[in-house]
Each structure stands twice: as C-alpha cells, then as structure tokens.
Amino acid sequence: MMSFRNLNLINPIVRAVTEAGYSKPTEIQYIAVPHILAGRDIIGYAHSGTGKTAAFAMPILQLLKRNTPDHKEIRTLILTPTRELVLQLEESFKVYSKYLPLSQLSIFGGVLSGSQLAALRKRVDILIATPERLLDLVSQRYIDLSKIEILVLDEADRMLDMGFAEDVKKILKLVSPKRQTLFFSATLPPDVQKFADAMLKNPVEITVNPVPSPMHTINQSVYFVEKTQKTDLLINILQDVSILRSLVFTRTKQGADRLVKQLERTGIFAAAIHGNKSQIARQQAVEDFRNSKIRVLVATDIAARGIDIEELPYVVNYELPDVPETYVHRIGKTGRAGTQGTAVSFCDEGERSDLTNIQKLIGFIMHVEKFQYLH
C-alpha cells in the first residue's frame, strides 16, 4: 500500500499526518508532492475534499525545513479569497507542522493584534492571507514580500470571481520572480487559465476529479432559521432519542466549544474536536462517540477529515460551509456502505448564497423542513 513515506516526506511530517488520522496519500498528494519537492511550478485542477491542502502544505513545510535563511522576511505566501478559507488553511498547517520549528501567521480583515505584530518582527515562515488585507499591510510597511520563496494561490477561480484579480497582480509585482508558484483552482475557465499562464514557469498540470459521494443514500434537507435560533433547533432535533449518533459541523473552533456547553446544559452528552484539542483528546472524543458514551460530536472541517465511523446515521450542518465541495465532504460521512443516512442543514439569512452554491453543485433543491419553536 502506498504510504506517506513513499513520497520521501521527512519523519516529523509523516508522524503529524498519521496522528491526524490519514493512512495513505490521496491521488493529488501522490502526484503533486514529488513535483513540489523538486521545485516545480504546479497548476492543480482540484476540488475541496481531494486532499489538495495537504498536497501543497506537506512539501512546503519540508522545503522550508531544509534551510534557515539569515533574513527575517516572510518565506511562503498563501493567498486565498475568504476569511473562512484562511482559517481552514491555518488549522491544516498547524496540524502538519506539529513537529517542525516553523512559524506561521494568518491575516484577514480588522486590525493587527499585538501578537501578530510581534510575529512579523521575528520571522514568519508561512503567511496565509486574503489579497486585499495583505496589500493594506504592505502599504503600511508592516510586511515585506521581497524574499518570498513559494507563492500559493488557493481557490484561484473564486479569487478572480470575487474581483481580486488586480490585487493579485499587484502582489505578483512585489514577490521575487525566482519564486516557486503553486496555483490551485476547482475550475479552469479561459480567464483563470490565462491568469495562471502569466505567472507560472513551465508548470506541471494536475487534474484530479472530485471524490464521488454516496448522494443517493443520503436524505438531505434544510431548515431556514434565524442565527440566534440555531441552538434551539438543534436541541429540538436531538431530543429524538432514535437519533443514536450525530456529527455536527461548525465553522470555528470557538463555535464548536460553545455549542458543546449549550448542549450539555440540556443533558445532551457531546464533545468537540478541532485543532486546539490535543491528539489524545480528539482520539478519546471519537472513541466515546463510536462507543455511544456521547451521542453528539461537534467538529470543524479539518478535525473531521480523519474520522471514519461506519454507523453514522445523522450529520448536521449547524453552519453552512462557504466552499460548496466541503458540504459534499461533510455529508459523505453518513450513508456509508449502502446504509441510509440523513443530512440536515441550518441556513440563516447570511448563508443564503452559500446554500445556492451548494445546491448548484449537488444538482437539486433540498427539501425545506419546518421548525416548530417549542420554547
């Protein structure tokens, strides 16, 4: 069986990904990692759920570990279009770099905190940012991009669709032309292809089809609900004792912890898993879930990726992801091996566009459930 060691990855990285619950490389990791380690530019056509983030994170960490330069400037820049994607990437890099002495920083909207400013004064090996916020900080002279060794454009089609093309062009002028560039996009329409051609040098092209999902064995429905009423709705649903196990997805680590406390106040045994939890705590929570010591596991997307539970009847999207493919990845945890699964989604006013994008991807309109307020 192909393992991460076959990709010539160093022990600290192999150990970290194995502990995170991954047993073997995905197709894109198998193809991309050797090319990135060899210093090649990459254009990757890959959806979320294919293992794309690890495909560039693992080799980047290894390349950075090889040498420690004298300067204190940023070495790797990862651009992505939204705050949620920045946070997802941050969590992934924390998982994979667990046993490496490399620093990282994430920036998006708002003002820099004291700890972020302190980090920039030392050295940031990996900076994850939205284009607009990055340029703002460059203009204020907080950030120098002249020593960038590796540039990653993640979700490039969405970046252009959201109007960041000019911002990215400005950033390209600030980074070294000697850099290695990794370009990832879920789709490659002509404008995205043209954009990639202008910034890549003799790239390796990689196309990976999205992971098929057992859609036909999953009942999917949606509740339109006020943001403030989501917890009440979840509690009402979980009062049905016939739902033996439920995996509940939140967007943030803090949201997962908060939700567990709210559930436990009503007598529903639950645990949270996310990047801030130790490996032992995460494994214990999953084991308790498997053994029915707890009925509810609340998870962020990154933490849930290594979970494989055979009998999981119920998935709840407490908050919708803003990446449609992430929805498919989430609900694929239920309806396994021909069994029937149920996936319900909560959609507040601010998530309507996310729901529209998800329904476009899956090719049908979900059944709308009615929420009877019992409180």
Image (tube, helix red, strand yellow):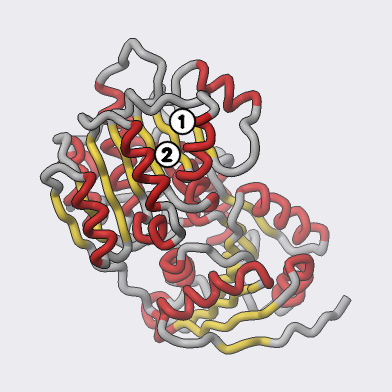
Residue at coordinates 57% horizontally, 67% vertically from top-left? 320
- Give me the disc on residue 104: 1
Q: Is residue 183 left or right of residue 246?
A: left
Mark 1 and mark 2: span between their CA atoms? 8 Å
Q: Quadrant of residue 72?
A: top left
Q: What amino acid is at disc 2?
A: Phe
Residue at coordinates 52% horizontally, 63% vertically from top-left? 322
Q: What amino acid is at disc 1?
A: Gln
Q: Indicate whether 22 appears above or below 188.
A: above
* Viewer-nearest of discs 1 and 2: 1
Q: Quadrant of residue 217?
A: bottom left
Residue 295 showing in the rendered view: yes
Q: Indicate whether 234 appears above or below 220.
A: above
Name the residue carrying label 2.
Answer: 93
Residue at coordinates 75% horizontally, 61% vertically from top-left? 263
10 Å crowding of disc 1: few (<14), some (14-19), many (20+): many
Measured as percent of width and height from the top left, residue 116 is found at 58, 27
Measured as percent of width and height from the top left, residue 248 is found at 60, 64
Measured as percent of width and height from the top left, residue 29 is found at 24, 50
Q: Is residue 124 left or right of residue 174?
A: right
Measured as percent of width and height from the top left, residue 344 is found at 59, 77
Residue 280 showing in the rendered view: no
